[in-house]
Image (tube, rainbow, N blue to C red):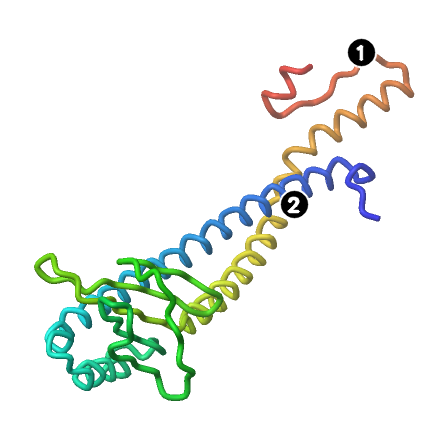
């Protein structure tokens, strides 16, 4: 079993520097991943709410004239505007479905109340967004949208791959730098230990340890 206490001073210094670098790199990469993923989710939410608002404003006339077909045709354009939307529904002010859209190849999704304005929720693979339809202070209904997050999965996979490569590179570089630096740190200490052993064996206490730096001369 690995035990750092059983290592020499030289190797201990190497491992201390490497473990410190690994800890710092880990914290930095975790912060990077969290920040990037949160940034994507925020942009996706704002984009979806904006699209829902546009749909709502353009559906007011259809709602006023009870033209379900016109509203449904407008929702069908989502396949070209935003292909990530797999379900969209316009709920009238009484809470009933006025028009809906289902992306081909997907199942219908039932949006549940309360239909709160600017409501959003992230599930495992989807983003749900509710946006109220309001004009001149009058409430007409709510646009509900379900968006798949396949792009987020691709981004996460790319980020993890890039992070792993950078992390591995950082660990290798930290090992190299630690090995180079330890000669400057442990060299004088090992020399001092050898001289102490020689003085102890020979009994010549008048011997001095040759120094090349200010730190050691201060100690001696």
* Residue on which disc 1 sits: 206
Would residue 127 appear left or right of 182 to someone viewing this image?
left
Of 5 and 114, nearer the camera is: 114
Residue 70 in the image: above or below residue 204: below
Mark 2: which secondary structure?
A: helix
Mark 1: give few (<14), some (14-19) or many (20+) Cα within 10 Å: few
Specify the farthest residue to the left. 136
Q: Residue furthest top?
A: 206
Give residue 181's mark.
Answer: none
Above or below residue 2? Residue 8 is above
Q: Residue at x 24, y 80 (%)?
A: 75
Residue at the image position 79 percent from the left and 26 percent from the top = 193
What residue is drawn where x is 36% and y is 88%?
A: 104
**Is the Cβ of the residue at disc 2 closer than 8 Å to that at disc 1?**
no
Residue at position x 41%, y 70% in the image: 149
Give the quarter of the figure containing the C terminus.
top right
What is the x, y in percent for residue 50?
Answer: 22, 65
Q: How many marks?
A: 2
Of callouts 2 and 1, the N-terminal one: 2
Residue 197, image x, y percentages:
85, 24
Please give left or right for residue 151 compared with residue 68 in the image.
right
- The residue under label 2 is 179
Res 126 quadrant in image = bottom left
Few, some or many residues within 10 Å of mark 2 (<14, 14–19, 20+): some
Residue 174 place in picture, x, y as percent: 59, 48
Tell me where residue 71 sits by quadrant: bottom left
Q: Is residue 21 above or below residue 119?
A: above
Q: Is residue 31 left or right of residue 7?
A: left
- Position of residue 64 in the picture relative to residue 118 (left or right): left
């Amino acid at each position: 079993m690995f035990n750092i206490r059983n290592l020499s001073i030289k190797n201990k210094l190497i491992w201390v520097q490497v473990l410190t670098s690994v800890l710092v790199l880990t914290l930095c990469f975790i912060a990077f991943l969290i920040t990037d993923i949160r940034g994507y989710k925020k942009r996706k939410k704002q984009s979806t709410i904006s699209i829902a608002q546009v749909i709502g404003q353009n559906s007011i006339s259809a709602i006023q004239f009870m033209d379900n077909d016109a509203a449904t045709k407008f929702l069908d354009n989502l396949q070209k505007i935003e292909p990530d939307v797999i379900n969209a529904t316009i709920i009238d002010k009484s809470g009933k479905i006025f028009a809906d859209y289902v992306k081909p190849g997907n199942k219908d999704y039932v949006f549940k109340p309360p239909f709160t304005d600017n409501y959003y929720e992230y599930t495992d693979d989807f983003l749900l967004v509710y946006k109220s339809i309001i004009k001149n202070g009058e409430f007409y209904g709510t646009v509900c949208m379900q968006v798949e997050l396949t792009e987020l999965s691709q981004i996460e996979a790319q980020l993890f791959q890039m992070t792993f490569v950078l992390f591995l590179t950082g660990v290798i570089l930290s090992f190299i730098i630690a090995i180079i630096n330890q000669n400057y740190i442990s060299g004088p200490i090992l020399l001092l230990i050898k001289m102490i052993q020689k003085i102890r064996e020979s009994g010549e206490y008048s011997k001095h340890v040759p120094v090349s730096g200010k730190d050691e001369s201060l100690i001696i």
